[in-house]
Amino acid sequence: MSVKIWTAYKLKDPTKLWELVHDIRLKGQTNVTKALAVLYAAKAFSIDPKSPEYQEKYKSLTKYLGDSDSRDIDVRYSLADHHFCRAYKEQYSSHLRNEADFTVSVSLRHFEGNIYLIPHCDMFMRDALNFLKRDKRLVDYHYQNQVRPHDAKVSDAAYERRGKIYEKMEKAGVWNDYLVIEVCAPHNFYLLRPKQKDVEKILNACPPKIKRKKKPGIRTVEKVS
């Protein structure tokens, strides 16, 4: 028997569906932006100020915006944003995974009068939908067909009934009949990208150690070893 693991929730009251869909979209997108801010900050922190990309972007921004003590974060944010926008586009059109798998969604499935929610997200976005675990409108309906999780807070009989429901859904072809709530996808990613000020707050808590040297022409920024 192959291992099958379902991560799912059951809606207690179907009349609460639209209210729940609204909250999933808003809370999920807020959490996606927070998670992206952390990734952006990590990428910005790792950028080498001696790299050609940094130097080119620094010259470009200084040319149009003038020199400033804040120009370093402007450059780091711009390069991080460009990196993730390009990486997400490449990932979405490829069968291979990379660090920029930012797609987050929730599938809705209706079966025998009940509505089930199946969350979908990669490890980098795993916190985006964690609020579903605490939502009082939902019942945790996770199931594994070979090993019962130690934290499953239901009786053995109830857990087995849960497995039979999933088996029926598979046989009935319900897995191919669903609606999707898109939380983060390529078409709305530009709206969910973190603002520079949010990334800057994270960097200010642990800023890159740099020193500045003024030279004729463009100022350079170097890491302190």
Image: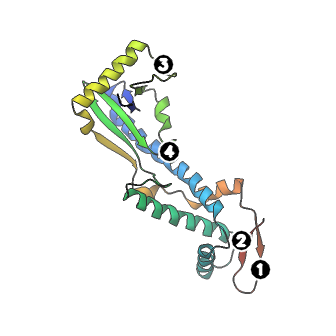
Amino acid tagged 2: Asp
Amino acid tagged 1: Lys
State the residue position of label 3: 153
Q: Measured along the vertical axis of the image, is residue 187 above or below residue 129?
A: below
Amino acid tagged 4: Met
* Residue that lies at the very extreme toward the bottom in this rendered image: 216
State the residue position of label 2: 69
Q: Nearer the viewer, residue 83 or 214?
A: 83
Amino acid tagged 3: Lys
Q: Nearer the viewer, residue 217 or 163?
A: 163
* Residue that lies at the very extreme toward the left in this rendered image: 172
Give how far apart the Cα atoms at labels 1 and 3 are: 63 Å
Mark number, residue 123: 4
Find numbered disc 2 in the image and state the secondary structure of the residue it sits on: loop
- Tell me residue 219's x, y (percent): 71, 79
- Binning the other alpha carbons within 10 Å of mark 2 as few (below 14), some (14 to 19) or many (20 upward) gives few
Side of 172 relative to 220 (left or right): left
Give how far apart the Cα atoms at labels 4 and 3 are: 25 Å
Residue drawn at 59 percent across, 64 percent down: 77
Side of 20 relative to 42 (left or right): left
- Image quadrant in which you'd find residue 167: top left
State the residue position of label 1: 214
Q: Measured along the vertical axis of the image, is residue 183 above or below residue 137?
A: below
Contact (Cβ within 8 Å) of mark 1 with mark 3: no
Q: Nearer the viewer, residue 18 or 193?
A: 193
* Residue 31 visible, this orientation: no
